[in-house]
Every structure is written in structure tokens, then in C-alpha cells.
Amino acid sequence: SAVISQKPSRDICQRGTSLTIQCQVDSQVTMMFWYRQQPGQSLTLIATANQGSEATYESGFVIDKFPISRPNLTFSTLTVSNMSPEDSSIYLCSGVAGVETQYFGPGTRLLVL
Amino acid sequence: DAKTTQPTSMDCAEGRAANLPCNHSTISGNEYVYWYRQIHSQGPQYIIHGLKNNETNEMASLIITEDRKSSTLILPHATLRDTAVYYCIVRVVGGANSKLTFGKGITLSVRP
């Protein structure tokens, strides 16, 4: 299994600013992902974080808005740029241990005023 | 789009078995059935997964029909702490397409 932690656990930000969320896994994972969960909704995949190369974004998400880094096999960051109230969500990091099981972090609760 | 369909909600009495159904009629031969749950304000928790055979672990049992077009997650003795949204997901294991795509899930309410 893999234990995933995220920082910060929550934040309140002003519109127009940016927030970087950190994700740390306690063991090497083959793949890492970032998800968003808007209030009352299910999880939506933002992107696959690729080690040492640009992330692979899902439709509707772009690098300028959600830049992602993954410098090694256990760490990744997601930046929410130029925030607006519509970005208020829970952002979740996820990693695949081995090939079969995907684990999730506790999430970062973001409120944009 | 999610490739599974689940009822919106169900409830069961504490101590009884909770049987959560899932339809995945378009499942491919290389796709596994995964179950996760999300308790309020927490990240999704892995429960169990399977390909063809029934599976059991300390949390639950997974029963997959012979044609693989549907499955049932069984919580043998539901407790109040099992109240959560349960997601049934089909996923290819390994490769660029091995990502979890979440649908709306089923909200299980366990009543005292």
C-alpha cells in the first residue's frame, strides 16, 4: 500500500492569487494523478503527473492554469493559478502502487474569495 | 464518461449485510472492477478489486457475474461508520489508460 499526504490540508485564498499544493508518497509509485472535487460533485481527473516531463492533461484542463511538477517518484506539486471563486474545490493527489491499486491523499480544501 | 451505473442511494440496518450493485455491461476483457468509498470530507478509500473471480478481504466481498456485466459489493456486517459514497469503477491495469474515472457513486446510509 501507499500512504499519501498533502499540504496544505486547507486554505482560504484571494482571487487572482496562486496556490501550490504538495503531495508526498511514503513509497515509490508508478503513476501519480491529480483530481478535483467540486462541492457536491464526484471526482474529476485533472492530469497525470509524469516524472521528469510535462504532465498529461485531461480535456478542459490546461497547463497555464494547473501547472504540475513531479521531480521524482514520490513527490508532486499542483499549482492553481490566478484563482477565482470557481476554483473552490477539494484537490486530491493519487498514486498507483505496483500496477493494480491506486491510493488517494486526504485532499486539500480550497476556498477562493 | 463513467462506464458503470449504480443506484443513487440505498440504506441498510446496522449489523445487516449491505449489498451494493453495479452494472458494467460494456466492460472489456482487460478491465478490472474496482470499488472505492468516500466518507464525508475524506479522500477516497480503496476497498477491493477483481477481474473475473469473486474476491474477499477484511473489508468486503466482491461478487462478479460470470459474464462480467455486473457485480455486487457486500459489506457483511454494516456499521454506522460505513455510511459513505461507494464508487464502482472499471479500470485497465497498467499503461497510459490505467486511470480511475469516477461516476456519481451510490450513497449508502446505515441506520441504527
Image (cartoon, coloured by chain):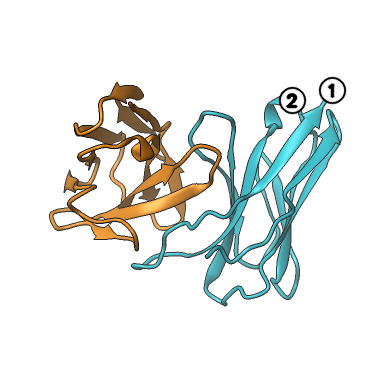
Q: Quadrant of residue B27?
A: bottom right
* Residue type at numbered disc 2: Leu
Q: Position of residue A59 (x, y in %)?
A: 34, 63
Q: Chain of mark 1?
A: B
| Closer-to-camera residue (B110/A60) | A60
| Closer-to-camera residue (A112/A77) | A112
Task: Say if mark 2 contacts mark 1, CB within 8 Å.
Answer: yes
Q: Which residue is mark 2?
A: B80
Secondary structure state at the residue bearing disc 2: helix
Q: What residue is at 28 percent from the left and 59 percent from the top?
A: A57
Horizontal side, residue B58 vs residue B63: left or right: left
Chain painted in orange in the figure? A
Vertical placement of B8 versus B24: above or below?
Answer: above
Q: Quadrant of residue A78?
A: top left
Q: What residue is at 76 percent from the left and 34 percent from the top?
A: B109
User: Would residue B85 be visible to someone looking at this image?
Assistant: yes
The disc, 2 or 1, on the residue closer to the chain's N-terminal end is 2
| Closer-to-camera residue (A89/A22) | A89
Q: Which residue is mark 1?
A: B112
Q: Chain B shown in which color?
A: cyan
Q: What residue is at 72 percent from the left and 66 percent from the top?
A: B70
